[in-house]
Amino acid sequence: MNLLEDIVTTTAEAPVVTTTVEKCTVSLMVDDEVYQTLEVEKGTKATKPDDPVKSGYTFGGWYKTSTATTSSYFDFNDEVEEEITLYAQFVQSLEYRLSSDVSYYDASIGSCEDSSITIPSVYYGLTIKGTYGSEGSSTLTSISIPDSVITIGDKTFYECSSIISITIPDSVTTISEKAFYGCESLTSITIPNGVISIGYGSFSNCSSLTSITIPDSVTSIGDSAFESCSSLSKVYYKGTSPYRNTITSIGYSNDALTNAKWYYFTSNGASETEQGKWWYYDTDGVTIIEKVVE
């Protein structure tokens, strides 16, 4: 036996091992166009790209669906296991504040000069639950508040003098201090059914406000909530009794509210016969119809 020959033969016949790396494609979309494509080894993390830029807007994260939701938010700390398409979310250039427990955001119009604003319900994968104070705006005429918001914070729309109307979603339970102070173009407001308290000075100096709808869920109205609302003439109260029995506290300097004509809700509609000032909704569920029974 030739030992050297045996060693050379064995070495020459050793199998060559090759490793195949499986990769996944991550497609990043911005306004229906491909922003960037990433090739990522399966089971590893994708490298987060630079945030895309869109004039007049703020980037709000990447999502696995074209509509941003908390469940579709993509975290670049997660491992990629399959091919995926991600969509950029852009929101108006408002201010966003993360909660102390890092579980949700609040939003503010800040110094935004747009005439129309839509507050998003989600920002960087977290729900927007509240609003907070702004610098005021003379250009803002309309605003959309998502049904994720439960609190309209202090001075949210402070001296937004051009707002004509606003819809507060049913999710809101609290309207805080001076939330709508000085919204002098606001002509009417409907407080949603879930609101329990209307804060101090919340509608003070809304000089064009002529009517307000108040639900029977409200138990307290703060001091000066309707101070200097010189045009306020009608209150549509959703209580069924001509006694403000669910409102246990109306603070001082609310003469404009208490001296206005109060109409009480009737489920009987046009057939109501009991004496009093009544109101009900027309068939469209929006238009208010008054009925006075002498």
Image (cartoon, rainbow, N blue to C red):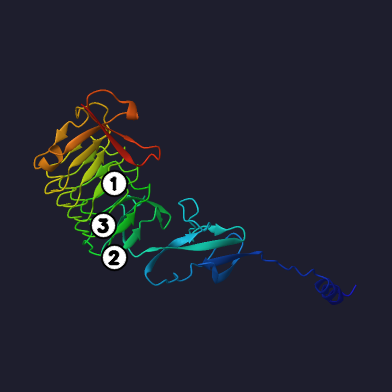
Side (left or right) of 228 relative to 79: left
Please rate how many residues cluster around mark 2, counting C-alpha atoms within 10 Å: few if below 14, some from 14 to 19, many from 20: many
Mark 1 belongs to which amino acid?
Thr
Q: Is residue 193 above or below residue 50?
A: above
- Number of numbered discs overlaid on the protein picture: 3
Question: What is the x, y in percent for residue 77?
Answer: 48, 59
**Secondary structure category for the residue under label 3:** loop
**Secondary structure category for the residue under label 2:** loop
Label 2 or label 1, whichever lies nearer to me, is: 2
Residue that label 1 marks: 151
Q: The C terminus lies in which quarter of the figure?
A: top left
- Mark pair 2, 1: CA separation: 20 Å
Question: What is the x, y in percent for residue 11?
Answer: 80, 73
Q: Which mark is residue 195?
A: none
Find the residue positioned furthest to the top: 274
Residue that label 2 marks: 112
Mark 2 belongs to which amino acid?
Cys
* Residue 195 visible: yes
Residue that label 3 marks: 163
Mark 2 vs 1, N-terminal side: 2
- Mark pair 3, 1: CA separation: 19 Å
Q: The N terminus lies in which quarter of the figure?
A: bottom right
